Amino acid sequence: MSTATTHGGPRLPQERRLVTEIPGPRSRELLARKQSAVPPGIGTTLPVFVTRAGGGVIVDVDGNSLIDFGSGIAVTNVGNAAPRVVERVQKQVADFTHTCFMVAPYESYVAVCEKLNALTPGDHEKRTFLVNSGAEAVENAIKVARHATGRQAVVVFDHGYHGRTLLTMTLTAKSMPYKHGFGPFAPEVYRVPLAYPFRWPTGPDNCAEEAAAQAIDMINKQIGAENVAAVLIEPIAGEGGFIEPARGFLPKIVEYCRANGIVFIADEVQTGFARTGHMFACEDEGIVPDIITTAKGIAGGLPLAAVTGRADLLDHVHSGGLGGTYGGNPLACEAALGVLETIEQDGLVERARHIGEIMLPRLRALQEHNPIIGDVRGRGAMIAVELVVPGTKEPYPAAEIARRCHEQGLLVLTAGTYGNVLRFLPPLVIPDHLLEEGLSILEKALNVD
Ligand code: PLZ
């Protein structure tokens, strides 16, 4: 029985169905058109063109229905075309599409900010403002931190990813493909070690302690704490390979920031909105950031991002010092309100935990029999396997395995500084049978000798 999703999305049959090879003939035609109209700098992970998507599937122009373990990179947490999002956006698009919030305001923007102030960690007084993308949120968080502290230096971590604009690509760790050839970079950005348990030279047990000590020592000696405006970190490194910093690392860094008047910024662009089995990943270790940046899952795919933080920091900036034409567009704000209602009313935080409880044990069992899996990690519906050449820690390329999954109708994404991580970010509304089927496809794809 192929049931329609109970969690909304277009009522698409929740099944994997391959009627052509992947990519099929219509997709191949469109890929050829793409190739002559769009520069190669804009890549393609899954080589099919989409017509509809919802629940746990993506349907392509050839009529194939593929299992979605990507959520458009952690965006469609509530599923594609989730009913509450569709309803609100449809009403809004008929009422008005844009006034510019800085020119003539509207209620939905304020409502989104109120919600974020209430939902983000900490019960201190907060403010929020809205922008268009994750990168723009991070840039603005740095602007606020610099303004409020009167300091310039920004500290980021190995394996960090924060965007593709000039400042945020500077904040990003990995050269190829994000930075290569795009310099010169922005000044006053400093990088320190991240507590990466699987690859820590002395092993995972001392990782938190040693990495924090090294990071703090580098800040003290090479920058000077009194020159640092902000320390910026993803509570789980996303593009860098779903690296959960060893437990205890984040609290130590936060404590250091507090003691030195440094603004601690959590970049929750990828980890936010129920993805990790918490509303925000910081909650896992009780971290309360001074500023938190969000995007992606906030509005189900409509472009929206937010900077939320301590009122005294955000209020420091002069009137008119922040903004942008489209930030908090009314369609995106309505979508965000629909997303937040959906997360709450459909219990998607719990649902993310449930997904982790299905995926992690199966992947760990797989690891016992398949030495290509060096590490299994993640929380909730943000799960990854790090691939190695069997018997070593040498990276094994994930792209090849991903391609095999794609051919079988399972969309998976890759990640990792060494390109050897397969990451799984299913929509939180994916039915269990598609999760299980996806894992079975993965299991076969990982059988390489
Ligand atoms: N901060 C933690 O994960 C975006 C990048 C996709 P934007 N990650 C997906 C790609 O290859 O461009 C991201 C993130 C974290 C910031 C960003 C940037 O968010 O909305 O892509 O600007």
Image (spheres, helix red, strand yellow):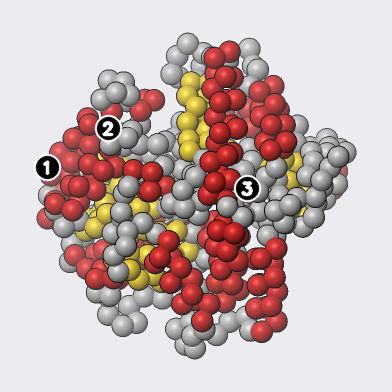
**Number of residues whose C-alpha sits closer than 10 Å to that of mark 2, classed few (under 14), some (14–19) or many (20 or more):** many
Query: Mark 1 vs mark 2: which is more N-terminal?
Result: 2
Q: How far is disc 1 from disc 2 in space, using C-alphas?
A: 20 Å
State which quadrant residue 143 falls in: bottom left
Query: Mark 1 vs mark 3: which is more N-terminal?
Result: 1
Which residue is drawn at the image coordinates 26% and 40% (left, top)? Answer: 192
Q: Which mark is residue 208?
A: 2
Q: How far is disc 1 from disc 3 in space, using C-alphas?
A: 44 Å
Q: How far is disc 3 from disc 2 in space, using C-alphas?
A: 31 Å
Kind of residue at badge 2: Ala
Left or right: 158 in relation to 298: left
* Nearest to viewer (mark 1 / mark 2): 2
Q: Which mark is residue 136?
A: none
Residue receiving disc 1:
221
Kind of residue at badge 1: Lys
Q: Quadrant of the N terminus?
A: top right
Element at label 3? loop
Q: Residue 39: percent from the left, percent from the top? A: 62, 53
Q: Is residue 179 above or below residue 414?
A: below
**Number of residues whose C-alpha sits closer than 10 Å to that of mark 3, classed few (under 14), some (14–19) or many (20 or more):** many
Left or right: 277 in relation to 216: right
Element at label 2? helix
Q: Residue 126: percent from the left, percent from the top? A: 33, 68
Which residue is drawn at the image coordinates 45% and 58% (left, top)? Answer: 294
Which residue is drawn at the image coordinates 11% and 42% (left, top)? Answer: 221
Q: Quadrant of the C terminus?
A: top right
Label 3 beta carbon less than 8 Å to ligand 1: no
Q: Is residue 149 above or below residue 35?
A: below
Query: Mark 3 vs mark 2: which is more N-terminal?
Result: 2
